[in-house]
Amino acid sequence: MKQIYIIRHGETELNRQGIVQGRGINSDLNDTGRAQAEAFYQKYKDIPFDKIYTSDLKRTWQTVQKFIDSGLPWEKLSGLDELAWGIWEGKPNTEGSRDAFREMLQSWESGDYTAHFEGGESVQDVYDRLKEPMKVLSTRPEEETVLLCMHGRAMRVFLCLLLGKPLSEMTEFPHQNTVLYKMGFEDGNFTVLEFNNSIHLDGLVIGQ
């Protein structure tokens, strides 16, 4: 069975402030994010990964930088980028923005997967572009153990795609920073081996 470790990137300063980044904002990890990345590395550094995949956004590859520095093959796949939130990317976390996002999430949960903000993507758009990374994972049997770092909303969409679930079930996949979903791939099917695993964060103390 092929094993795929899918994690969300570490925290950025905009994450901490509750500000949406999306595909159009290329943020760095903050101190907390770097500590989360280090904790993940210390927990999983002895796993014999054959390949690393990240999005085109640096917060993903910064999260797995130590694995990359160890000499593992690394490939960026733009299909793994976060959903583009259009006009709302980088905007302050206000009551108005929260209302707008609540309405959008309700649209998706009710089955309107093509709903999107001006200048942004729908979850259907993201679902469609994630088919290429899914194909990559499905067609490279020589990569038996894979580490993949991506983004919160895109991760939820990806898990729906891999598991054949409707996008209305995205909310069933929690996704705090550096949380792990370990997937198996065998006989053409993806399965969940570990769900929302954050054991590497237990006891993590972030310096002030």
Image (tube, rainbow, N blue to C red):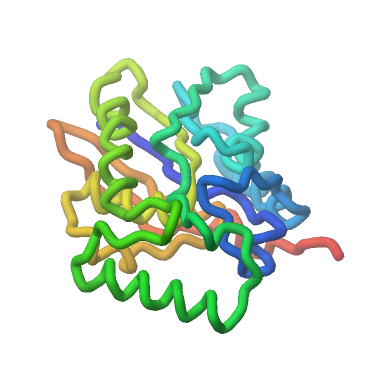
Q: Which residue lies furthest to the right in this view?
A: 208
Given residues 127 and 91, the one toward you in this image is 91
Q: Can you see residue 48? A: no
Q: Can you see residue 191? A: yes
Residue 52 horizontal/vertical position (percent): 49, 28
Count the labels in the image. 0
> Residue drawn at (30%, 46%), measured in percent from left and top?
125
Q: Residue furthest bottom?
A: 95
Q: Which residue lies furthest to the front in this view?
A: 118
> Residue drawn at (24%, 47%), measured in percent from left and top?
161
Residue 169 lies, with reference to residue 37, above or below; the image says below
Given residues 189 and 159, the one toward you in this image is 159
Q: In which quarter of the image is the N terminus?
A: top left
Given residues 52 and 102, the one toward you in this image is 102
> Residue drawn at (46%, 41%), measured in percent from left and top?
81
Q: Quadrant of the C terminus?
A: bottom right
Residue 193 lies, with reference to residue 139, above or below; the image says below
Relative to 158, 5 lies left or right = right
Relative to 68, 194 lies left or right = left
> Residue drawn at (62%, 73%), measured in percent from left and top?
93
Residue 88 horizontal/vertical position (percent): 54, 62
Residue 119 horizontal/vertical position (percent): 45, 52
Given residues 146 and 75, the one toward you in this image is 75
The image quadrant of residue 138 is top left
Residue 1 lies, with reference to residue 50, above or below; the image says below
Residue 45 horizontal/vertical position (percent): 59, 34
